[in-house]
Image (spheres, rainbow, N blue to C red):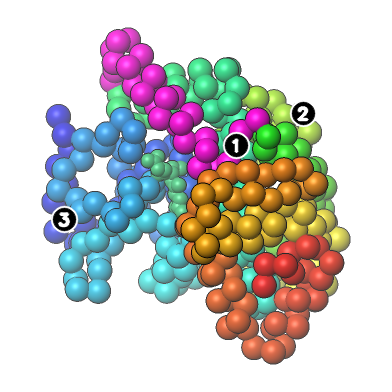
Amino acid sequence: MPLHIDPASVLNDPRLTLMGVPGSPYTRKMLAVLRYRQIPYRLILASNVTGGEVEGLPAPKVSLLPTFFLRGTDGALEAVTDSTPLIRRFEHTHGGRSVIPADPALALVDALIEDYADEWLTKAMFHYRWSYAADIAKAGAVLPIWSRPPLSDDELARYSALISERQIARLRYVGSNEVTGPVIEASYERFLDAFEDHQRSHRFLLGARPGAGDFGVFGQLTQLAHFDPTCMAVTLARAPRTFGWTGSVDDLSGLQPQDTDWFDVTALPGTVTAILREIGRVYPTFMLANAKAVQSGAAQVETQIDGKPWVQQPFPYQAKCLGWLRRDHAALDAGAKRRFEAAIAGTGCEALF
Ligand SMILES: N[C@@H](CCC(=O)N[C@@H](CS)C(=O)NCC(=O)O)C(=O)O
């Protein structure tokens, strides 16, 4: 039976209402942010693929998970997607336990890491899941269960086929193909090595408290490290701390963050610079080539990443992400801009701004 939800009940509920599934990295990212921030919520399990069977709620402009149902400026309930601006919106609506560093220069480093996780690490997530037979089989068998229990064997087989076909056809959106696959995997492995090294001395990416970037990385790792078998084995073998970190970031409601827990952006540990160097090695080239292709209406993004050819179809949303990073950079005052530029100097990330 479809679940009927009355919009008025959502408007009057002090909890946030969102729709998502455990197999969606961005759903997991947002759930972890809400738990860490101690913001009460309710999750409606529903998938875009198998159909949500939820009636009564507005539909978002683009159907993405997670979808939040929030009061719009006109007072009516609206469906809102995109984790990055939602995190900033909740910073204004709910006080305390911020995931945005107080120093705007460090906040931009955090936003850069978040964007890399959301828009680049997700390539690895999607690539491993829908390229390898064992991963396709596991995702196909389990993903439908997460949003539509109970299912008979026949129904499960039908939804497994539906999900796999649909997602494999979408590999082209993230740019996973025979040419780019090895670049994606090598870059994931280098990221793991750099993050693992960082965790020998530090708990989170930018200090002893998590930023939005940690939650972005966490979201992708819920799948890369903890679910899809090929990359899970890679992660466990190369980066046991990262495997463990992913389990712990899921629920940080008991952490007691202090204002002094953030790194000083003028004295970042070398392990952060190494992570930024890995980001700078792959991400700016892709983002700039993609933005250029979107702008010129080209049919393909064609560039070289890490010295190897990269070909994929343009992704307009990621051109928007680049615009957001540049907007935030332009908004920094002269002192913060200097601190930020010194923090990323020599990493390759400068090319983005
Ligand atoms: N920019 C969005 C990305 C969300 C996203 O891509 N969600 C995926 C699931 S993880 C999705 O809903 N894809 C469309 C679909 O499955 O129909 C965010 O940050 O929340």
Q: Is residue 282 left or right of residue 60?
A: right
- Visible in this render: residue 114? no
**Between marks 1 and 3, how big is the CA–CA gap?**
39 Å
Residue nearer the viewer, 143 or 341: 341
Residue 25: give its label: none
User: Where is mark 1, residue-wise?
Assistant: 176
Quarter of the image that includes the C terminus: bottom right
Contact between marks 3 and 2 (CB within 8 A): the answer is no
Quarter of the image that includes the N terminus: top left
Q: Helix, strand, or loop for circle 1?
A: loop
Bounds of the magenta span?
A: 150-178
The amino acid at mark 3 is Pro
* Viewer-nearest of discs 1 and 3: 1
| Residue 318 x %, y % | 53, 57
The amino acid at mark 1 is Ser
The amino acid at mark 2 is Ala
N-terminal-most mark, 1 or 3? 3
Residue 7: give its label: 3
Q: Residue furthest top?
A: 153
| Residue 240 x %, y % | 75, 35
Q: Any atom of ligand 1 within 8 Å of the CB at mark 2? A: no
Q: In this view, does 214 lie above or below 147?
A: below
Identify the residue at horizontal 25%, vertical 66% (top origin). 71
Residue 159, magenta (yes or no) = yes
Identify the residue at horizontal 48%, vertical 48% (top origin). 26
